[in-house]
Image: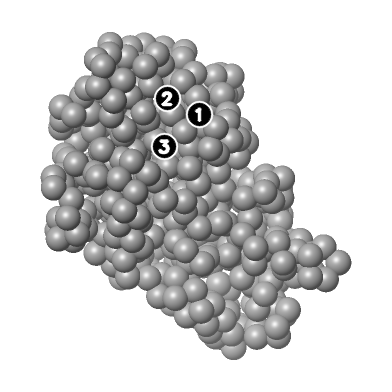
Amino acid sequence: MELEFWGAAQTVTGSMHLLRVNGYNILLDCGLYHGRRKEAFERNKNFPFDPKDIDVLILSHAHIDHTGNVPTLVQQGYDGPIWSTSATRDLCAIMLRDSAHIQESDVEYVNKKRARQGKTLFEPLYTQDDALEALTLFQSIGYGRPFMPVAGVQAIYRDAGHVLGSASITLDIDDNGQQKRLVFSGDIGRKNLPILRDPQPVEGADFIIMESTYGQRYHESPGQARADLKQAVREAVDRNGKVIIPSFAVGRTQEIVYALHQLLESNEIPEIDIFVDSPLAVNATEIFRLHPEVYDRETIGFMNDIGRRDPFGFECVRYIRNVNESKALNDLTKPAVIISASGMCEAGRILHHLKNNITNPRNTILFVGYQAENTLGRKILEGQPVVPIFGEEYKVKAKVIKIEGYSAHADHNGLLNWLKAAQERGDPRQLFLVHGELESSNALAQAAREQGIPQVHVPARGESFAL
């Protein structure tokens, strides 16, 4: 049995791990890599293996850095099953098509300028037709229900508490007569956050592939995050400015809307127009409403408290699909909160909102999620005075704020607690840390060794291990 790491290895995005066992090739996740545009396109386009050789694809959750390159895989010949939880399948039905639409739209926008300059035109990584073709291969199953992805391997999903439908994947493997259990953590959520249940522990793991996004960092408390959000909104109102929130359409947007709902109900912030300007976020919110079975008790209680309230719908919030309505937000003259995707400012409508608001000192750019290296969001967050948007330079004069407490990833302590629970329920021999920048992964690796894991690895891209 051999394990190869081809994505999210010493970096955060592009999750993709290949397990070779008994003549079968099992791919865990197939996410988009984000980074410098040309490098990212080439890496996403050119797989380090033949997609036709993959027997089965198993997805941990719907975020684009875990699923966004599935249409490319199918486009290049993969035709096997794509396993996911039911909620992940529902989210992918909108997210993969939206990813394709954004790529097509962004390429069209850029190509107008390149055509005038006589430059070679770009092509999207994949199209909406490719995304639709990929969706025909999905097979969904609920948490805790065993399934057989290939002969000799039984799989089961456990709730990872990270985003709607997110899961850790347990693989019970008959490796030439030897029984082995491999666990892929997926992205591990945080305890005591609103909307979703806490992560479930895993049992009996011999080998673990584990995320390490916040392997050396500590989150502020949910209470502090609420206080920071309140302060950001109140200050923007005082300055007669806008709060621009780049947010992942799935998970983070719904959490921020729910938090604003609570702040408004308790009169902690003045009434302010809130716009969710992302067709994907609008559609994703509808899917959230379809899956209350994964909500935690707090959210269920909020819904049932007064006349079956909708956590994501209230008087001040407006969901926007129409392009002209989105453009009209540029002409707003009163304070507002605009939540838009993508969360790392790499594509979509958020680019237009940044372009039109980043040079105004009355406005606030509020980050509520992780910003990967070389993304526009990271450049803004690091304090670069001038940033490129659609190939043009813009001075950053808006106030830039980061709230850590809304992260859906477990921090250093949360990751170690998840690992400790796995140790208490098994005896892991090897731990592979992925989905983290090298410094974060190394910090968590040292802590895991001190916690008693015999072998801890931080694999590089392309590195393989015999299990």
**Badge 1 local density, few (<14 within 10 Å), some, or many (20+)?**
some
**Badge 3 local density, few (<14 within 10 Å), some, or many (20+)?**
many
Label 1 belongs to which residue?
146
Does any portion of residue 439 appear in the rendered image?
no
> Closest to the observer: 213 or 114?
213
Q: Position of residue 212 (x, y in %)?
A: 29, 53
> Closest to the observer: 239 or 118?
239
Q: Amino acid at mark 1?
A: Pro
Judged by depth in the image, the label closer to the viewer, 3 or 2, is 2
Q: Residue 154: which disc?
A: 2
Above or below 143: residue 309 = below
Mark 1 and mark 3 residues within 8 Å of each other at the beta carbon: no
Q: Which quadrant of the rendered structure holds the C terminus?
A: top left
Q: CA distance from mark 1 to mark 2?
A: 6 Å
Residue at image point 34% right, 49% down: 425
Residue at image point 28% right, 11% down: 23
Does any portion of residue 249 appear in the rendered image?
yes
Q: Amino acid at mark 3?
A: Ile
Secondary structure under tag 1 reads: loop
Label 3 belongs to which residue?
169
Secondary structure under tag 3 reads: strand
Q: Amino acid at mark 2?
A: Gln
- Whichever of callouts 1 and 3 sits on the residue coming sooner in the sequence is 1
Q: Position of residue 74 (x, y in %)?
A: 45, 18
Which residue sits furthest bottom? 238
Judged by depth in the image, the label closer to the viewer, 1 or 3, is 1
